[in-house]
Amino acid sequence: MSLSQIDAASFQSAIKQNGVTLVEFGAKWCPPCKVLLPILDELSQEEAGRLDVYQVDCDESPELAAQFGIMSMPTVIVFHNGEPADKLIGLRPKSAYQAAIGRYVS
C-alpha cells in the first residue's frame, strides 16, 4: 500500500488547504478497512496530482476520531480546501468514493 498514515501531529499539514484530500479512518484489526485499502490505493494512483489520500488509525489517534465524530470503521472523509466536505461511513463500492471525489476534483 502506498497510503501514508497521519496522526494528530501531522493532520493539519497533510490536509490540503487548496484542493482535495481523502482521509480513511480505520484500524489494523478492522476487516472492512483491509478490504478498502486496495480501493483507496487505486484511487490515489488514478487521481495522482489531484488528490491526496491518507489513513488515520483510530486506535493510535483517538483524538482525531473523536474530533470528526467517527463512530464506525471504515469512515472516509473528503476534505475540500481544508474543510470536511463529504463523509462515507462503512465499506462502499469504488464508484461511491469516485463520485464523492468527483464533486471536488477538477
Image (cartoon, rainbow, N blue to C red):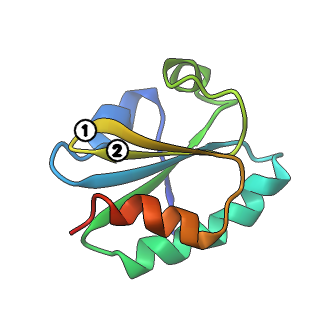
Q: Which residue is mark 2?
A: 79
Disc 1 is placed on an element classified as loop
Q: Taking the image as drawn, is residue 94 in sight?
A: yes
Q: Is residue 45 left or right of residue 39?
A: left
Q: Quadrant of residue 52?
A: bottom left
- Residue 25, position in %: x, y? 60, 41
Q: Residues within 10 Å of mark 1 (few under 14, many from 20)?
A: some
Q: Which residue is mark 1?
A: 82
The image shows residue 65, relative to residue 25, as above or below, that is above
- Mark 2 to mark 1: distance in Å? 6 Å
Q: Which residue shows up at 39% across the image and 61% down it?
A: 101
The image shows residue 20, relative to residue 57, as above or below, that is below
Tell which residue pokes out farthest to the bottom in this image.
46
Q: Which residue shows up at 57% across the image and 18% down it?
A: 66
Q: Amino acid at mark 1?
A: Gly
- Dots 2, 1 in contact, CB < 8 A: yes
